Amino acid sequence: MTATIRLLGRPRIERDGAPAVAPRGNKAWALLTYLVLAGCPPSRQHLASLLFGDALDPLGALRWNLSELRRALAGIAVLDGGGLALTLSPACGVDVRQLTDGTSAQALALADFGAELLEGVALPDAPGFEAWLAAERCRITSCTETVLVEAALDLLAAGSAAAAARLAARAVAMNPLDPDHHAVLVRSLTAAGDRPGARRQALRCTDLFRRELGCAPPAEVLAAATDPVPRQPPLPASAAAVRSYLDAGRASLMAGAVERALEQLRRAAGMAVEVGEPALRATAYVALAGARVHAAGERGTAVRGLLQEAAALARGVQAGDIVAAACRELGFLALQRGQQDRALLWLDEGRRSTGDDAEIARLLGVRGMCLTDGADYPGALAALDRSAALARQVGDSRQEAWSLSMIGRRHALRGEYALAAAVLDGALEKVARQDWTAFQPWPTAFRAEAAVGLGDLNVARELLDHAWVLATESDDHCWMATVAHGQATLSLAEGSPERARRWCDQGLTPAPWYLWPYARLLDVVCTITLDTAPAAAAGPVDRLADLASRGSMRDLLVRVHLHRARAGSRTALAAATAIAGQIDDPALQARIQACPVAG
């Protein structure tokens, strides 16, 4: 017997494809959904307060609903443990897990793909659960959009441009203000030979962005409407020539000659297409995409498409190390867009594809960064510790410094300032030893925040002023937002909210492509606005809520509800407590306890 728990759309249970006995009542479905999606088994007390806090006997109400679930899930799942764990039988699937953890093809095959999580279910007497459900619905919607774009890029790489356009059009319909959706639609129309349609779509996107956002769309959307001018390499295509251009491009990158490196790597990729060796072509694509991401700051669908095509080519010839490198870059891009589910999926594939310790160190480093963004601090520390140890073992000092910097960030976010300072001092020493100036603003900014937490304001000021010059000179918007957060934190510690707000504005203006530092800086804006002009706080708080929900930034989502509690919401504190229940962060729990509004 096979069984499926369907939580997308109207919830139901199927056995062998037919409707089966279902739990009675919305709260039983709510409980099941929470257990399916919870990061770790929740305590019974937490579940009782989350869902049945208004009952005369909350634990008794929980027991009744658990009996309903056991009746409905008999033979396909087990509910047990003090920390209540849901264990599914191998023959039982859950549609929402297939969406978040499956391939794009598996997700698209879902009967209710695109439907709302727990459609029609509402629990107004359980505000904590309602807040959690609203955030999960945003996350699932964002994941659905990402699946559509991933599948469209795969179809483009396979030469099925018309089918890719249909999927991209669905993504645009779901979220018309996401430029990536428009870019892949325009590219698909162009590749399908519908140039007039591509130009019309680009113009529609331009009008929409100017009308709704007051800005032009990214250049990628407009560029996608035109056929690229083919570049003629100066040498006949051969595998040796491709490798020579790859070597030259890497050397140019190390020397800081980014434009020259990009030209050399483009030539390598163009030649590799002519040579026709899949592994060589995949290698060239990964090298070019990596340069475009890390040296030129690209984040759009063009570079994602290049990486997905590289992964597909490498899979076809079982070139596991190349698959791993492509997946690592795809995971990095996904986490920067706040799409953690898909990021972890790419990183898991990369880890399965390689046995190379140096590559595993890099994959674990990105994984730790991703888990930190989502406030899974124990998982993040485990991944980053292992990454740093492997990097040390293979002699990759840059990766070791990178992973140590991420460990330091993790400690700083949890208020463990002495630990953060010690780790970040070690990371900065390694960064300086390698003259890695381009990366220096990141660990420096978090070392300064640790200094603020320890009361060393003069040390923090010196560090931040140095980091700000490096960030602005490199024109790296992510570093600028990160350092601006440190400057704003320092300004607040010095009693100057006006200066803090100016730093926030400076950090937010360039619109960094990495959403986490943008959202974190917006959190400071919310705090300052509530302190100085509370009537104007709703706008930035709502913006932060949207970013934190779609990006699974759970700690920032807790802060959203704390801001709303300060603004007078009678249910927001319960919502903050409910979401924070799954986060191992003493500093965040202390913030909840100190919230001046009692619900």
Image (cartoon, rainbow, N blue to C red):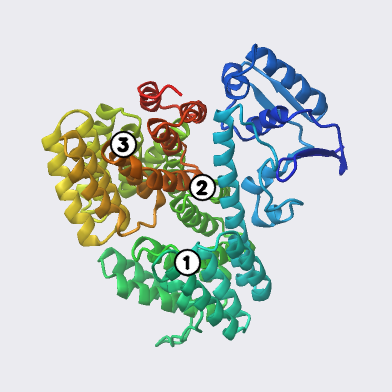
Q: Nearer the viewer, residue 281 or 30?
A: 30
Q: Which image quarter: residue 406? A: top left
Kind of element beneath mark 1: helix
Tell me which amino acid carries mark 1. Val
Q: In the rendering, which numbered label is found on residue 23?
A: none
Q: Which image quarter: residue 487? A: top left
Kindly identify which residue carries mark 3.
Answer: 408
Q: Residue visible at 48% across and 79% down?
A: 270
Kindly identify which residue carries mark 1.
Answer: 303
Q: In the rendering, which numbered label is found on residue 550?
A: 2
Kind of element beneath mark 3: helix
Q: Is residue 555 above or below residue 354?
A: above
The answer to whether residue 18 is seen in the rendering is yes
Give the CA distance from mark 1 to mark 2: 22 Å
Q: Residue visible at 57% across and 67% down?
A: 309
Q: Are the two marked residues, 1 and 2, in contact with CB atoms closer than 8 angstroms?
A: no
Q: Which is in the foreground here, disc 2 or disc 3? A: 2
Which of disc 2 and disc 1 is earlier in sequence? 1
